[in-house]
Amino acid sequence: MKRRHPIIRFFAHLVSNPWQVKRHFSAIALHEIEKAIVASEKKHSGEIRFVVEAGLHPIEILYKKSPKRRAIELFGRLNIWDTEHNNGVLIYLLLADRDVEIIGDRGIHQHLGDDGWDVICREMEALFRKSEFEAGVLHGIDKISAVLKKHFPQKGASRNEISNKPLIL
């Protein structure tokens, strides 16, 4: 995604707050996203987590924290890296920057790489630009699910290692 001027980015984050998340993601939309993750995880042994954040703290903006760096931080903090088959995937949306990042653990990342995740991110962002936020996330889940199904097909019953509930920060 095209980066904003630092001053514009600073003020976008300064005025961001949780009601903006609710404006783009109703309770029903969040429930549909959770249902899509549950349905997806029945097709493969991977784990998907969706996190949406309105904006970063102003100090993080002054230190030029990128959405990618924040996504990597959350990937570790939420233990998405700690799945049995190293196939956890984080979809992170930072609304103030209008940026989505996908971080995949080493087991799945080796099959897709940064370029593969970036393609999915750009497709999602195209839907976000049309204000189709729920559709964008569902599209991303569908694309990630297809990759996980190909490389980590479901073999019998599996345990849910990561919460399927969307996380709002």
Image: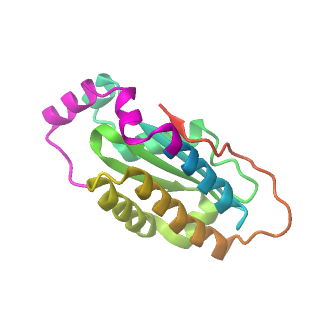
Which residue lies most toward the right here? 156
Instruction: Tell whether 149 sits left or right of 10.
Output: right
Instruction: Tell whether 144 sits left or right of 119.
Output: right
- Residue sitting at x 60%, y 65%: 108
Tell me if residue 27 is in the magenta stretch: yes
Q: Which residues are magenta?
A: 1-28
Q: Is residue 145 visible?
A: yes
Q: Is residue 42 above or below residue 103?
A: below
Q: Is residue 45 above or below residue 82?
A: below
- Residue sitting at x 42%, y 65%: 120
Residue 57 point in image, percent of width and height? 34, 24
Between 31 and 50, the one lying in front of the other is 31
Residue 67 point in image, percent of width and height? 36, 43
Between 54 and 103, the one lying in front of the other is 54
Q: Is residue 55 visible?
A: no
Which residue lies most toward the front here? 28
Residue 123 point in image, percent of width and height? 36, 65
